[in-house]
Amino acid sequence: MHWKRAAKVLLAGAILFFLGLNIYRGWRDASRFQWDVRPWPLVASFALALAFWFTTGVGWNLMVRCLGGSLSLRKGMKIYFLSNLGWYVPGKVWYAVGRAYLGQREGVSAGVISTSVLMEIVLSLTSSALMATLALPLLSPLSGAKSLYLGVAVLVLGLAVLHPAPMKLALALLERVLPGAERVANPPLRYSVMMGLLVGYLFTWGFVGAAFFTLLNAVHPLSLAWLPTVMAIYAVSWMAGFLAPFAPSGLGVREGVMILLLGQLLSVPAVTAAAILFRVWLILAGVLWAVVATGW
């Protein structure tokens, strides 16, 4: 029992350390810029970031319940917000370990939790790829009909991978990435349920994309016509950070891709400042939800 208690203390200490390190680095880098920030877009951006975390938590909770896990919304959200703090520890698996541990304490099997995490990854990558097609005119040298054909191809591929047959293969491959992952006997859900979850994930991308666009406007005014492109660029940046093997929570990689792509629209200093500040914004919003969840 003593070693279990020591392990909990060490893990909590590691989470707090790396979380604080992420926030410190963000503020340190942001302080290098001369700020001319409009306050109300900044407040609106933070509110949208809070909404983003809340909707993703609801989506994960629904997924667990669809897989047969008996988990109330309140307990599910608590597990989600607390385990998400593990994103900031190097290794990319600690949030999944945290969900499995907290889920089992609430009577949900490790198989259901592991399957929900694997399906969450598939849905997140698929929905972000679909969202990224909005930026094809900017990101691709293709134009006109060729760009449209590529967008349709991405859409068809995204819809196909969520079908139960290829989903089994995708889950089997992802099992090898997440150590100790267990699957339930028949993890793939009905195709109609997967489509509903995909729509929900696209909805959450709308929140986080709008939050980033609003923060950009706090730093530098930007026409509303660029909203779809900014949302798509954020999706591309998120994918790059998620797939980077050694970057905790995509640190550095996500911001680098944002600066590279958005540098075509705004000045590089403005984009850099906004990218760094938005990371801090998302961290603070997630921490705030975790603090609120401890009282549930």
Image (cartoon, rainbow, N blue to C red):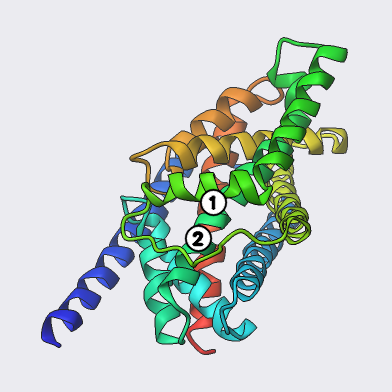
- Please provide percent x and percent y for residue 186: 55, 64
**Against 284, is 91 above or below?**
above
Foreground of the two, 180 or 95 = 180
- Name the residue tied to disc 2: 117
- Please provide percent x and percent y for residue 56: 64, 63
Residue 144 visible to an observer of this rendering: no
Using the numbered discs, state the Cα–Cα distance from disc 2 to disc 1 in whole angstroms.
Answer: 6 Å
Classify mark 1: helix, strand or loop.
helix
State which quarter of the image contains the C terminus.
bottom right
Residue 157 visible to an observer of this rendering: yes
- Name the residue tied to disc 1: 121
Residue at coordinates 62% horizontally, 47% vertically from top-left?
A: 165
Q: Disc 2 vs disc 1: Cβ atoms closer than 8 Å?
A: yes
Residue at coordinates 68% horizontally, 52% vertically from top-left?
A: 208
Image side of residue 111 versus residue 213, left or right: left
- Please provide percent x and percent y for residue 137: 78, 20
Image side of residue 200 versus residue 106, left or right: right
Say what amino acid the circle numbered 1 marks. Ile
Q: Dot 1, how many residues are within 10 Å of its Cα: few (below 14), some (14-19), or many (20+)?
A: some
Residue at coordinates 45% horizontally, 43% vertically from top-left?
A: 250
Image side of residue 265 versus residue 226, left or right: left
Residue at coordinates 54% horizontally, 51% vertically from top-left?
A: 121
State which quarter of the image contains the N terminus.
bottom left
Classify mark 2: helix, strand or loop.
helix
Q: Quadrant of residue 11?
A: bottom left
